[in-house]
Image: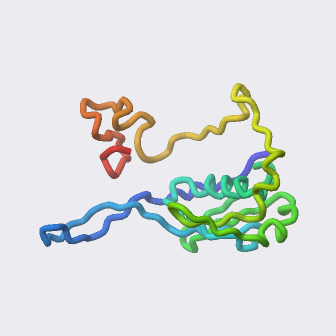
Amino acid sequence: MTVRLTQASAPLMQTIAVRDEFGAEREISIPAERALTVFVDKRELVTLMTLGAAPELLVLGYLRNQRLVEGVEQIDSVTVDWDVQAAAVATRGGVERFEEKTAKRVVTTGCGQGTVFGDMMADLDRIALPPASDPGARLSQPRSTGCSTRCAARKAPTNRPDRCTAARCSARTNC
């Protein structure tokens, strides 16, 4: 079964006006982080912060990571609409025990703050990873935006290893 996904990538950078250390006004590019509220079968779940490069894949990964779905085959579609800053997830049969799984929220600390649903450690002993030799154990996706796969000091296609030469790289620096 195929999951229907919008292709709603958003610009990764935005230009803003700043005043530099000499008092001169200039424009610089900064990451364009934005909020994306996730709805699962019309029920609000969480708001994620994202640059927006592949929001549909972010949502799928979040649902799997939080153990709300066992696999992508449970998902019918992920529709992202930046006009309303929302992602609508339609499942094929609902999320089993949705209220129970989302009732307990744990706020994490560290470099950033996050939310974890339920008791993730309760199922830890049941997790079995496929062997690395299994082709199904790897996720693959086309590289769509940003820097080349080998940029900066990792064999950038340039004579200057400190500069990224990818055509769509806004930063033009180490990636």
Q: How many marks?
A: 0
The answer to whether any part of residue 81 appears in the image is: no
Residue at the (61%, 63%) spot, across then down: 80
Q: Is residue 22 above or below residue 149?
A: below
The answer to whether any part of residue 170 appears in the image is: yes
Residue at the (43%, 57%) spot, across then down: 12
Q: Does residue 152 appear to the left or right of 121 in the view shown?
A: left
Front residue of 91 and 98 = 98
Q: Does residue 44 appear to the left or right of 93 in the view shown?
A: left
Q: Quadrant of the C terminus?
A: top left
Q: Is residue 156 above or below residue 88?
A: above
Front residue of 82 and 68 = 68
Residue 41 location (% of width, % of height):
78, 68
Residue 127 location (% of width, % of height):
79, 44
Colouring: rainbow
Residue 38 location (% of width, % of height):
66, 67
Q: Where, by quadrant of the figure, is residue 130 drawn?
A: top right
